[in-house]
Each structure stands twice: as C-alpha cells, then as structure tokens.
Image (cartoon, rainbow, N blue to C red):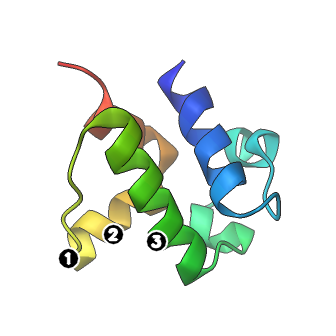
Amino acid sequence: MIKKRLAELVAESSDGAVTADEVLAATVPLSALGITSITMLRLIDAIESEFGVEFDLSEDGMGLLDDLDRLAATVAPR
C-alpha cells in the first residue's frame, strides 16, 4: 500500500513523465527512469507533507529517493 502511494507521488511529482506502474515495475534506480532534480524536490515535499517525515538532504538521505523499497521502509508508520 505504501509503495503504491509512493509510486503515485512519483508520477504526480513528475507531471506524468513517469507513471506509477513504471515506478512499481522498475528494476533500476528511480533516477534511471528519467526523474529530474525538480521532480525529486517535488517528491520530497509531497512525501514530507503526506507522511509527516523530514528528509535528510545529504547524499545518504537523497539516495533513499532512488530505491522505492528503502523509501517505503523509511516512511512506514512504526
């Protein structure tokens, strides 16, 4: 459920350039799907707003945005 919602947020943040189905089916890092830096910033904002988490904008924190499984584990309620 969380992965599906995150995939939808990626699609929304990319203005449809990448679909939620493409994100869910990806076997490569999300950046390899052609996600731009602007999309990444929009995605961070959307995730922070929806899931109430705060992103670490260091290289490690930004690396989470490339891996849907890691991202889902990070935002999942504990």
Residue on which the image places disc 2: 62
Q: Nearer the viewer, residue 4 or 25?
A: 4
| Dot 2 crowding, Cα within 10 Å, few <14, some 14–19, many 20+ | some
- The image shows residue 14 at horizontal and vertical percentages of 70, 64
Tell me the amino acid under the disc marked 2: Met
The kind of secondary structure element at disc 3 is helix
Residue 59 figure quarter: bottom left
Q: CA distance from mark 1 to mark 2?
A: 6 Å
Tell me the amino acid under the disc marked 3: Leu
Whether residue 27 is visible here, answered yes or no, is no
Contact, mark 1 vs mark 3 (Cβ under 8 Å): no
On screen, residue 74 versus residue 34, left or right, reads left
- Which residue is depicted at the point 25% across and 65% down? 61
Q: Does residue 23 lie above or below 44 as drawn?
A: above
Whether residue 42 is visible here, answered yes or no, is yes
- The image shows residue 1 at horizontal and vertical percentages of 54, 18
Identify the mark nearer the N-term, 1 or 3.
Answer: 3
- Which residue is depicted at the point 33% across and 48% down? 48
Q: CA distance from mark 1 to mark 3?
A: 13 Å
Residue on which the image places disc 3: 41
Q: CA distance from mark 3 to mark 2?
A: 10 Å
Contact, mark 1 vs mark 2 (Cβ under 8 Å): yes
Contact, mark 3 vs mark 2 (Cβ under 8 Å): no
Q: Quadrant of the C terminus?
A: top left
Q: Does residue 63 lie above or below 25 as drawn?
A: below
**How many marks are shown on the rendered structure?**
3
On screen, residue 60 versus residue 42, left or right, reads left
Residue on which the image places disc 1: 58
- The image shows residue 37 at horizontal and vertical percentages of 54, 81
Identify the mark nearer the N-term, 3 or 2.
Answer: 3
The kind of secondary structure element at disc 1 is loop
